């Protein structure tokens, strides 16, 4: 009386675990989805995917989804951007249907719960955020956190919530629609959130550090927190070493490997 497997089950190479009821992790995943993680349905499978030149983003995908299904990685040449990239994907089951639609605003249940909000922000920042360590004046240090996207509603919600939580956060219209940026014209207005007031910046780094799954950003936040009371002369070599290591890890700075055809849903 053992039931036969369906054709879909018989052809499944990697077992798939259903998503549970961890709302903090769900908030983080929705932050990724609002960023540059894409989702689409392939028959009974939901494919989560992204492209990147940074191995840290591959690791972020594995840290987040490997427990639910296999995370595959293939190298390919992106003709649209004229660059070699990694295609990273994970085929998950129907329990991840909440990721199919890309959010254009942050849900009220996330905005109304502080831990959920921080987890959403951590996921969004892991995709879209940037932490900077700069020289200020003669020998001072300046730290900056910024988010630059076309998601106007999401960015304004983030700023509103951060201000309600006591942060000094600013938002700017960075680039008008139709104006080129890095050689690419934007079809929408580009907005930027910036936190550079020191107390707010350090608080943001301390809060998001344990929630982040992106190794490059983890190391930047760690260095910022470690360097908060140091001069630029004391940290400049460590900052440069981190920048160089990140640059060398990118796919265009590594030895070329064969291009692999992207696999079908598994």
Image: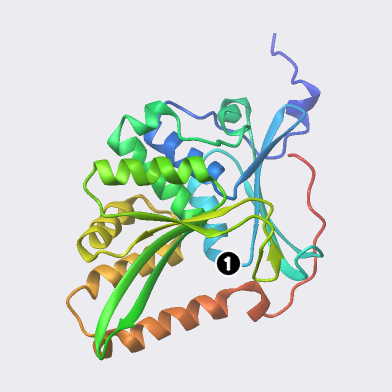
Q: Residue at x 34, y 84 (%)?
A: 238
Q: Is residue 210 above or below residue 242?
A: above
Q: Give whichever of 220, 103 is nearer the camera.
A: 103
Instruction: Indicate the quadrant where residue 260 lies.
Output: bottom right
Q: Is residue 178 left or right of residue 138?
A: right
In this view of the protein, can residue 120 be seen by the observer? no
- Would you name the residue on which mark 1 appears? 54
In this view of the protein, can residue 36 be seen by the observer? yes
Instruction: Indicate the quadrant where residue 257 lies.
Output: bottom right
Instruction: Indicate the quadrant where residue 104 lies.
Output: top right
Q: Residue at x 48, y 80 (%)?
A: 245
Check the image and name the residue furthest to the left.
229
Q: Residue at x 26, y 55 (%)?
A: 168
Q: Residue at x 35, y 67 (%)?
A: 144
Check the image and name the residue furthest to the top.
1
Colouring style: rainbow
């Amino acid at each position: 009386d053992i039931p036969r497997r369906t054709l879909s089950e018989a052809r499944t190479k990697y077992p798939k675990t259903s998503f549970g009821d961890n709302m903090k992790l769900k908030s983080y995943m929705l932050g990724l989805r609002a960023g540059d993680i894409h989702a689409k349905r392939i028959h009974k499978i939901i494919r989560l995917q992204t492209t990147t030149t940074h191995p840290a983003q591959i690791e972020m995908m594995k840290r987040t989804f490997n427990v639910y299904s296999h995370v595959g990685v293939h190298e390919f040449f992106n003709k649209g951007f004229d660059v070699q990239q990694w295609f990273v994907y994970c085929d998950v089951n129907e329990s991840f249907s909440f990721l199919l639609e890309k959010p254009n605003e942050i849900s009220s249940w996330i905005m109304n719960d502080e831990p959920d909000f921080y987890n959403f922000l951590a996921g969004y920042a892991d995709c879209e955020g940037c932490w900077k360590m700069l020289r200020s004046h003669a020998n001072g240090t300046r730290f900056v956190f910024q988010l630059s996207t076309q998601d106007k509603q999401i960015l304004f919600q983030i700023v509103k919530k951060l201000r309600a939580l006591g942060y000094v956060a600013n938002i700017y219209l960075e680039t008008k629609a139709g104006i080129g940026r890095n050689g690419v014209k934007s079809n929408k207005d580009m907005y930027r959130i910036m936190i550079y007031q020191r107390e707010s910046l350090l608080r943001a780094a301390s809060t998001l550090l344990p929630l982040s799954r992106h190794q490059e950003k983890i190391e930047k936040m760690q260095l910022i927190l470690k360097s908060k009371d140091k001069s630029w002369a004391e940290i400049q070599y460590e900052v440069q070493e981190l920048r160089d290591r990140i640059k060398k890890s990118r796919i265009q700075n590594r030895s070329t490997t064969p291009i692999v055809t992207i696999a079908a849903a598994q």
